[in-house]
């Protein structure tokens, strides 16, 4: 009975956050305890043959070449989500453009954005700067990509990527990239919902500040599903280097 109650509580929490389109701040994510279950990272290009895995950036090339790595369970869930899309339209498939990000790269992006905001708002405190910067680039301490649990993903068909209103990682308009932005067309909203639903059905947590970002096992995921601790922690991983 206790297990059933816990499952019910998780479903209620998730449903509430989907309805409220909750975006967690740093303070909320820091409350989640960090745990590491030692699950391996896998090469998404090799274990997800029917999913397009191709970087749009080259920042991870020095660490893992052209391979996109994620945790094993993340890969399994992506495969299941991809299969569910094909039941809707046999021409649909997922396209993943980013997975694991080395902490050094994450820190570099965070500091760069933070310095820009600091120059624009010199009176802000460090905590305020961190909080605002986190809205654009996740603070390394609570980031999902550094755990191998987060992906940047979209849907493609025979004609290319479905119209989501913006390209992945296009921060020209931070309102438009929000999952449920009111400044997009009905077709774009429908496509975003299709991506959202296919991944949340596999227990991925959406980040509603970016329509393309989903995670499993990180602190964002734990917060979204009402869990007290994460499954994954920050990793220092390089290709051909022993895991952990």
Image: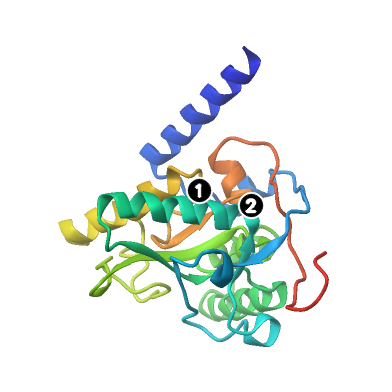
Q: Quadrant of residue 31?
A: top right
In this view, 223 is above or below 243: above
In the image, 148 versus 124, the foreground residue is 148
Q: Are marks 1 and 2 in contact (CB under 8 Å)?
A: yes
Observer-nearest of 172 and 7: 7
Asked whether residue 34 is in view, the answer is yes
Residue 180 in view in this figure: no
For mark 1, give the secondary structure.
strand
Q: Which residue is mark 1?
A: 205
**First in sequence: mark 1 or mark 2?**
1
Estimate the x, y position of residue 15 in percent, counting from the top left. 42, 33
Q: Residue at x 63, y 20 (%)?
A: 3
Query: At 61% across and 43% down in the image, what residue appears?
Result: 222
Residue 218's label in the rendered image is 2
Q: Is residue 191 above or below residue 160?
A: above
Residue at coordinates 53% horizontally, 42% vertically from top-left? Answer: 224
Query: Residue 39 or 119: which is nearer the viewer?
Result: 39
Quarter of the picture containing the C terminus is bottom right
Q: Secondary structure at mark 2?
A: loop
């Amino acid at each position: 009975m206790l297990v059933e109650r816990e499952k019910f509580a998780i479903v209620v929490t998730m449903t509430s956050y989907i309805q409220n389109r909750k975006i967690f701040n740093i303070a909320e994510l820091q409350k989640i305890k960090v745990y590491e279950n030692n699950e391996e990272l896998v090469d998404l290009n090799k274990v997800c043959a029917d999913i397009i895995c191709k970087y749009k950036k080259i920042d991870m090339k020095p660490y893992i070449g052209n391979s996109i790595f994620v945790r094993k369970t993340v890969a399994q869930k992506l495969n299941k989500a991809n299969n569910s899309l094909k039941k809707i339209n046999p021409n649909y498939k997922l396209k993943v453009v980013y997975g694991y990000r080395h902490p050094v790269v994450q820190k570099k992006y965070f500091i760069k954005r933070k310095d820009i905001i600091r120059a624009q708002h010199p009176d802000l405190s460090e905590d305020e700067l961190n909080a605002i910067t986190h809205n654009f680039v996740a603070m390394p301490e609570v980031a999902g990509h550094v755990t191998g649990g987060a992906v940047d993903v979209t849907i493609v068909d025979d004609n290319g990527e479905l119209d989501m209103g913006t390209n992945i990682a296009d921060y020209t308009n931070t309102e438009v990239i929000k999952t449920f932005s009111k400044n997009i067309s009905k077709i774009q909203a429908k496509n975003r919902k299709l991506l959202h639903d296919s991944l949340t059905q596999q227990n991925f947590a959406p980040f509603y500040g970016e329509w393309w970002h989903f995670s499993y096992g990180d602190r964002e995921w734990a917060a979204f599903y009402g869990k007290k601790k994460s499954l994954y922690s920050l990793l220092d991983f390089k290709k051909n280097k022993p895991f952990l």
